Amino acid sequence: MTQSIPLDTTPAPRQRRPEWLKVAMPQGEGYTRVLALTQDHRLHTVCQEARCPNIAECWARGTATFMILGDVCTRHCRFCGVTSGRPLGYDLDEAERVSDAIARMKLKHVVVTSVTRDDLKDHGSELYRRMIVRVREKSPGTTIELLIPDFRGHREPLERVLSARPEILGHNLETVPGLYRRVRPGTRYERSLGVLKMSKEIDAGVKTKTAIMLGLGETPDEVRQTMRDARAHGVDIFTLGQYLQPTKDHLPVERFVHPDEFREYKEFGLKEVGFGHVESGPLVRSSYHAEEQADSAATTART
């Protein structure tokens, strides 16, 4: 059972970031090229929308996580920098533009995510399917990783997405169950675990992946139990990163987790829980080093 906690609306002072969280300003030829490409194709990236701290590094390497179904989310999670509200339809041509951009970038591995679209009957699953089909046609050597919303736990949209055979299917737990009411109102921990389990039931060959943020008030025991829960539901790849407050209107950081603690979680996840790959560090996000994660999990599965 999910343990609920009282909702504390008392504002907390913003803490100064430690040295290990300082990152370079976005710049350079690679960054400029990716920025121009996304603008030319009228694309959204989660790198920009979620204010990812790794945007300088990833864009300099020529990689990006594309975000489809617009840039307005129907959920109101208190940690997320993506705009919440009522979306105005969506553009089916987005699949064409994303696949064109992927082909132009000559990507070996691509990550595609989306806002949550509870306003749509299919939750946006048809656009996911269409996008995968077009990428397969234009970039047959590219492996595809998706980071999907929970589709309200419905099986049909998940089956539609998986029918296009992505290599990796990600859905983030985001935090430990006891913090869901505070961090992810309107979302349920058990439902998110169910999406991950259902993915394996539909397609046993797909690699599944999830992620959580640290620094929101969770305890080490809660983190370790969440990792066990994910593995028990068939998850292959697990990532942990530091929560960073996007704006003053979002949840404050309760604690900056030291890199040594992140390393301990990685060792625990690999040696005791049995994940194929664990990416764990202050600046890690679910799509950070995604290509390396996919290769590592695949290698582990073959041996």
Image (tube, rainbow, N blue to C red):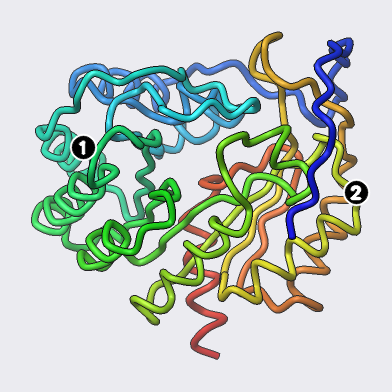
Q: Secondary structure at mark 2?
A: loop
- Look at 28% across and 18% down and name the residue there: 36
**Which of the two residues, 299 or 184, is positioned nearer the viewer here?**
184
Which image quarter: residue 159? Answer: bottom left
Task: Look at 79% across and 20% down and name the residue there.
Answer: 252
Q: Earlier in the sequence, mark 2 or mark 1?
A: 1
Residue depicted at 75% across the width and 50% down the height: 176
Nearest the camera: 148 or 100?
148
Q: Is residue 95 above or below residue 71?
A: below
Distance in Å between CA atoms under marks 2 and 1: 39 Å
Residue type at mark 1: give it: Val
Q: Secondary structure at mark 1?
A: helix
Q: Residue 188 at x, y = what percent?
A: 60, 49
Q: Is 274 situated above or below 27? A: below
Left/right of residue 33 with respect to residue 175 in the rendered view: left
108 vs 274: above or below: above
Q: Nearer the viewer, residue 104 or 237?
A: 237
Front: mark 2 or 1: 2
The type of residue carrying mark 2 is Thr
> Which of the labelled discs sits on residue 220, or is there none?
none
The one of 34 and 94 positioned closer to us in this rendering:
94
Q: Residues within 10 Å of mark 2 (few under 14, many from 20)?
A: few
> Vertically, is 5 above or below 207?
above
In the displayed structure, does residue 235 sit left or right of residue 30?
A: right
Which residue is drawn at the image coordinates 41% and 63% (left, top)?
Answer: 168
Image x and y of residue 56, in percent: 53, 26
Marker disc for residue 98:
1
The image position of residue 83, as x and y in percent, is: 46, 18
* Residue on which the image places disc 2: 219
Tell whether 183 sits left or right of 87.
right
The image shows residue 198 at horizontal and vertical percentages of: 44, 71
